[in-house]
């Protein structure tokens, strides 16, 4: 589908756009789509998008095979992605060196949300999309969610709707356009183009799409496994529209100090990443159907065959990464001078292009630490679990269902006072103003932190 975008208002009208976004966020009872219509549409889309997944043997993966020599799992086209072996050495966390499989997907995908005004209120064009790894099938996704292999139709499937809105936007129509990373523990150097683009009345909602207000999306963000990871990361890139907290006078640390802290962590942390081939990856066993860790921890690589009634192609095979356990992703928030501050951690993950990105206060799968001494557990994990009953936000959310099978984390936002100590230089209180500034640039906040920024705005 080809669509023409419309220019943005002039710089002098940017404050008006912020006010319009605020009105959209306040429209929780619905705009052009009522809440009752939205609920009915979601039920209808779940019924229409039937999907069936079977676990199969690796030998049954059509178009996929283990490469001679390296043992890496690759697609015959050389496109899509590969599962490779990696050796990692790091001074971050309790384990100094390990080997692991990792998804290598060098292509830059497009994640885009279209904005259109209805009676002066911005609405977001969201898509009901089923992914093979989703625990519950259909979830709310961006207008466009496509890898380069998908939108160049390597698979021979149908075209991606609305793609031209984002690949060829009219100058002045772009609200946000930034490269952002994905899970650095599971992806090697993976990033996507996160975009928000204004469109005009000629862009209409097709069958699997719906126009909703920001307030309606925020309400859905408070439900388990409903707004997918790709939608959440794009939502975090929206410019600030809230004016219910103090200005920068309330920041605990000046902007230059926050940036200096990030630069110092990137400079001082040590990280060595070496591709070694999947066949040489120590501690992992390849069976007929799964690649598993010797302790049964971390994740598995599994083979699946998928039948789908509403995807670009009706059937395909692929590997998926399946975590062993449900994650805990927690953000501590406090107010200083009236401004909300987020306790962020400078995280080292092997798949980050910059070695360090800012993550939530806690980000882990607790089961992965059961073999280690109690002192090796992630900082603040015990505090987050102890305070979970007080959480302002406690929602089970899925990670990216196109590459991960049943990957879910409990996302928590917990308000704390100034009594909570900062345990090391890996942590810093950063104001929401400063976080929103950092989100204008690539590779500053990781995908879990971006989800929690979107959730915090929804409260």
Image: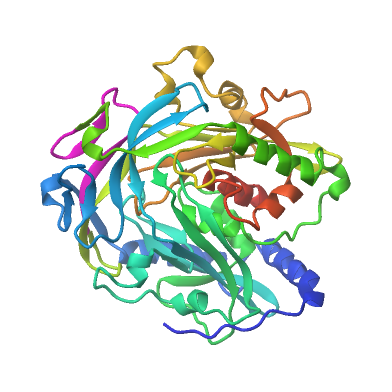
Residue drawn at (63%, 48%) of the image: 453
The foreground one among 29 and 140 is: 140
Identify whether 58 is placed above or below 234.
above
Left or right of 4: which side holds 345? right
Residue drawn at (47%, 45%) of the image: 397
Identify whether 36 is placed above or below 62.
below
Left or right of 332: which side holds 105? left
Q: Is residue 288 visible?
A: yes
Read off the magenta span. 286-306
Give residue 302's position: percent from left, percent from top.
24, 42
Q: Quadrant of residue 340?
A: top right
Identify whether 327 is placed above or below 58.
above
The foreground one among 31 and 419 is: 419
The foreground one among 265 and 225 is: 265
Q: Is residue 162 visible?
A: no
The foreground one among 200 and 64 is: 64
Give residue 321's position: percent from left, percent from top.
31, 43
Residue drawn at (80%, 39%) of the image: 253
- The N terminus: image quadrant: bottom left
Q: Is residue 302 found inside the magenta-colored segment of the image? A: yes
Residue at the farthest left position:
59
Give residue 170's position: percent from left, percent from top.
59, 82
Scheme of colours in the image = rainbow
Residue drawn at (79%, 28%) of the image: 418
Q: Main secondary structure of the magenta part?
A: strand
Give residue 415's position: percent from left, percent from top.
70, 34
Identify whether 453 is placed above or below 175.
above
Q: Is residue 269 found inside the magenta-colored segment of the image? A: no
């Amino acid at each position: 589908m080809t669509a023409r975008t419309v220019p943005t208002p002039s710089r002098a009208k940017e404050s008006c756009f912020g006010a319009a976004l605020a009105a959209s966020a306040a429209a929780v009872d619905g705009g052009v789509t009522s809440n009752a219509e939205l609920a009915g549409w979601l039920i209808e889309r779940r019924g229409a998008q039937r999907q069936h997944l079977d676990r199969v043997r690796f030998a049954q993966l059509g178009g996929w095979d283990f490469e001679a020599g390296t043992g890496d799992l690759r697609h015959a086209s050389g496109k899509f992605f590969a599962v490779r072996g990696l050796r990692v050495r790091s001074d971050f966390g309790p384990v100094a060196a390990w080997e692991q499989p990792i998804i290598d997907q060098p292509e830059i995908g497009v994640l885009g949300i279209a904005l259109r005004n209805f009676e002066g209120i911005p609405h977001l064009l969201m898509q009901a999309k089923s992914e093979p790894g989703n625990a519950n099938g259909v979830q709310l996704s961006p207008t466009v969610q496509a890898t380069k292999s998908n939108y160049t139709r390597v698979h021979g499937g149908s075209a991606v709707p609305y793609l031209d809105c984002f690949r060829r936007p009219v100058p002045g129509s772009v609200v946000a356009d930034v490269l952002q990373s994905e899970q650095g523990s599971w992806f090697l150097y993976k990033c996507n183009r996160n975009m928000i683009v204004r469109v005009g009345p000629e862009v209409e909602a097709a069958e699997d799409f719906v126009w909703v207000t920001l307030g309606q999306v925020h309400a859905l963000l408070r439900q388990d496994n409903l707004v997918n990871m790709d939608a959440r990361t794009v939502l975090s890139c929206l410019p600030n529209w809230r004016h219910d907290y103090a200005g920068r006078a309330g920041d605990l640390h000046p902007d230059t100090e926050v940036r200096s802290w990030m630069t110092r962590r990137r400079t001082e942390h040590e990280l060595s990443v070496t591709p070694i081939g999947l066949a040489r990856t120590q501690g992992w066993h390849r069976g007929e159907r799964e690649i598993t860790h010797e302790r049964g921890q971390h994740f598995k690589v599994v083979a699946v065959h998928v039948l789908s009634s509403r995807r670009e192609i009706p059937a395909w095979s692929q590997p998926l990464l399946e975590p062993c356990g449900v994650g805990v992703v927690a953000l501590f928030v406090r107010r200083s001078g009236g401004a909300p501050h987020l306790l962020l951690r400078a995280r080292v993950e092997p798949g980050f292009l910059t070695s360090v990105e800012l993550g939530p206060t806690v980000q882990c799968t607790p089961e992965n630490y059961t073999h280690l001494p109690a002192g090796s557990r992630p900082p603040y994990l015990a505090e987050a679990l102890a305070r979970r009953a007080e959480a302002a936000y406690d929602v089970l959310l899925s990670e990216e269902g196109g590459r991960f099978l049943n990957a879910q984390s409990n996302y928590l936002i917990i308000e704390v006072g100034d009594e909570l100590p900062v345990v090391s230089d890996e942590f810093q209180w950063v104001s929401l103003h400063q976080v929103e500034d950092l989100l204008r640039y690539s590779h500053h906040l990781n995908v879990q932190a971006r989800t929690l920024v979107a959730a915090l705005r929804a409260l």
